[in-house]
């Protein structure tokens, strides 16, 4: 039997907590035998949610009580420092103590990012851990790195992002020699702001990554690169625009199909194919965004995440653990540091 991977799920985080995190946990343990989920949060609340489910392996879901909840609007640093018995802090400490392999939360992004770095800690040599979601493209998926953790990144940070992203895409997604590109406002090497201009030659000279140059925003959905490197401000704008355009297009398509009898008949005919196509462009199908470069795995899902996204994030943690991604990243970064090379 495969090694059991212990995944902590923040049962109190997100817009649909505790119902959706609990449901996602149940779906995960029912689907795979190599998962043990630890739900952190108010025990009586979680137990009530779990009581709605009967046909799941109860020995593979446990509850660790946490009496406090960090709200989205709270200042992250103060929240992590003061609410030591919150579902986020309790969960991250389980990873820190190696009593769990991974932590998944739909709660406060700021608290998860701060807590991940302060409590779980960075791997030796990692300057800044980036938040890296998989985004759908016409060719499959690409890794957007960074999308929210480091808004004032330096060139050396972006070089590390490229290395970490390459390891993730090769060993988790299965893309050999993944193509790495830096987000820019043109294809020419001399284009870009000061950060991009300084980073470009460093990536070009970096051994061990397949750097293909610049990528413009319109090229990202076409899958022209596998690892999309940028600092967090740009990455977050790309991610949010991606999600917004996707939602707007779906609304327009549905509206167009319901215009008249002919369009409704046509909608019935194309519904199966359209549903499959739209599913492939659903970011929640790929789980959450891991905070790469930590000593343990921390994954942030959307605040609006439903059970399916949380379940997929748990599966993501299993693959991350089985492929020893943290160890591979730590080895690669430390190797470059000791060798004096970037």
Image (cartoon, rainbow, N blue to C red):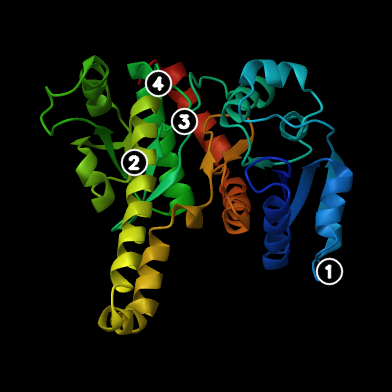
Q: Is residue 30 above or below residue 144?
A: below
In the rendered view of the protein, which quadrant contains the C terminus?
A: top left
Give the Cα separation between the discs numbered 3 and 4: 14 Å
The residue to which callout 3 is attached is 332
Q: Is residue 32 left or right of residue 294?
A: right
Q: Give the mark nearest the N terminus, 1 or 2.
A: 1
Q: Nearer the viewer, mark 3 or mark 1?
A: 1
- Near mark 4 (Cα within 10 A), the count class, few <14, some 14-19 or many ≥20, is many
Q: Give the mark nearest the N terminus, 1 or 4.
A: 1
Q: Nearer the viewer, mark 2 or mark 3?
A: 2
Give the Cα separation between the discs numbered 4 and 2: 24 Å
Considering depth in this image, is 332 or 24 the residue closer to the camera? 24
Return the x and y of residue 339 as percentages of the image width and height.
Answer: 41, 18
Circles 3 and 1, Cβ within 8 Å, touching? The answer is no
Circles 1 and 2, Cβ within 8 Å, touching? The answer is no
The residue to which callout 4 is attached is 157
Give the Cα separation between the discs numbered 2 and 3: 33 Å
Residue 263 seen by the camera: yes
Q: Give the mark nearest the N terminus, 2 or 3.
A: 2
The residue to which callout 1 is attached is 54
Question: Residue 241 has which mark?
Answer: 2
């Amino acid at each position: 039997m495969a090694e059991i991977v212990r995944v902590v799920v923040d049962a109190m985080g997100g817009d649909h907590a505790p119902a959706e995190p609990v449901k996602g946990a149940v779906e995960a343990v029912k689907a795979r035998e190599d998962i043990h989920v630890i739900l952190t949060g108010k025990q009586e609340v979680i137990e009530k949610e779990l009581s709605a489910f009967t046909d799941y392996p109860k020995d593979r879901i446990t509850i660790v009580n946490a009496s406090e909840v960090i709200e989205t609007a709270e200042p992250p640093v103060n929240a992590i420092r003061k609410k030591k018995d919150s579902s986020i802090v309790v969960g991250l400490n389980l990873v820190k103590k190696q009593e769990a392999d991974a932590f998944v939360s739909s709660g406060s992004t700021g608290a998860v990012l701060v807590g991940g770095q302060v409590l779980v800690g960075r791997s030796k040599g990692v300057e800044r851990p980036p938040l890296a979601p998989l985004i759908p493209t016409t060719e499959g998926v690409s890794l957007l790195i960074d999308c929210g953790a480091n808004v004032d990144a330096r060139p050396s940070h972006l070089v590390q992002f490229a290395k970490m992203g390459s390891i993730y895409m090769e060993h988790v997604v299965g893309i050999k020699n993944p193509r790495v590109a830096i987000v820019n406002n043109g294809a020419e090497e001399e284009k870009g702001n000061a950060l991009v201009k300084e980073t470009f030659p460093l990536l070009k000279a970096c051994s061990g990554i397949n750097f293909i140059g610049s990528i413009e925003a319109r090229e990202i959905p076409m899958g022209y690169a596998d690892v999309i490197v940028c600092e967090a401000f740009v990455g977050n704008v790309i991610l949010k625009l991606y999600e917004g355009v996707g939602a707007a297009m779906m609304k327009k398509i549905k509206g167009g199909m319901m215009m008249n009898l002919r369009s409704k008949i046509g909608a019935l005919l194309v519904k199966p194919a359209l549903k499959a196509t739209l599913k492939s462009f659903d970011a929640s199908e790929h789980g959450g965004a891991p905070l790469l470069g930590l000593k343990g795995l921390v994954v942030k899902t959307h605040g609006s995440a439903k059970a399916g996204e949380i379940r997929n994030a748990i599966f993501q943690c299993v693959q991350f653990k089985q492929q020893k991604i943290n160890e591979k990243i730590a080895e690669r970064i430390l190797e470059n540091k000791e060798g004096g090379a970037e």
